[in-house]
Image: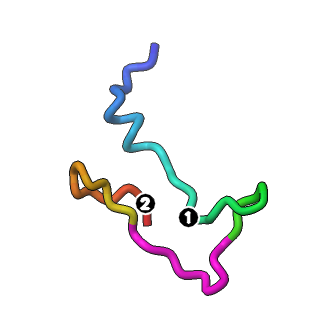
Amino acid sequence: MDNMTWHDKAEALSFRTQAFINGEFVNSASGDTFEIINPATGHSLAT
């Protein structure tokens, strides 16, 4: 049985750093990324 809480599962998620354009994930032209902040908590979701 799975003993992970939903908090543990949420922490284990990974987010893509690419844009979804024309049916595929692609990098930015410059290769730059930026941090995504959850406005409710102030925590970083992805970089």
Q: Which residue is mark 1?
A: 17
Q: Amino acid at mark 1?
A: Thr
Secondary structure under the numbered disc 1 in the rendered image: loop
Q: Which mark is residue 46?
A: 2
In screen coordinates, is 27 left or right of 17?
right
Q: Amino acid at mark 2?
A: Ala
1 and 2 marks in contact (CB < 8 Å): yes
Q: Main secondary structure of the magenta part?
A: loop
Q: Position of residue 21 (x, y in %)?
A: 71, 62
Quarter the C terminus occupies: bottom left
Mark 2 crowdedness (10 Å alpha carbons): few <14, some 14-19, many ≥20: some
Q: Residue at x 26, y 56 (%)?
A: 43
Q: Residue furthest left?
A: 41
Q: Earlier in the sequence, mark 1 or mark 2?
A: 1
User: Does the stretch in magenta take in 21?
Assistant: no
* Magenta region, residue range: 27-35
Q: Residue at x 52, y 53 (%)?
A: 15
- Write down the quadrant of residue 2 in the picture: top left
Q: Position of residue 33 (x, y in %)?
A: 50, 75
37 over 32 or under it: above or below: above
Q: Position of residue 30 (x, y in %)?
A: 61, 86
12 over 31 or under it: above or below: above
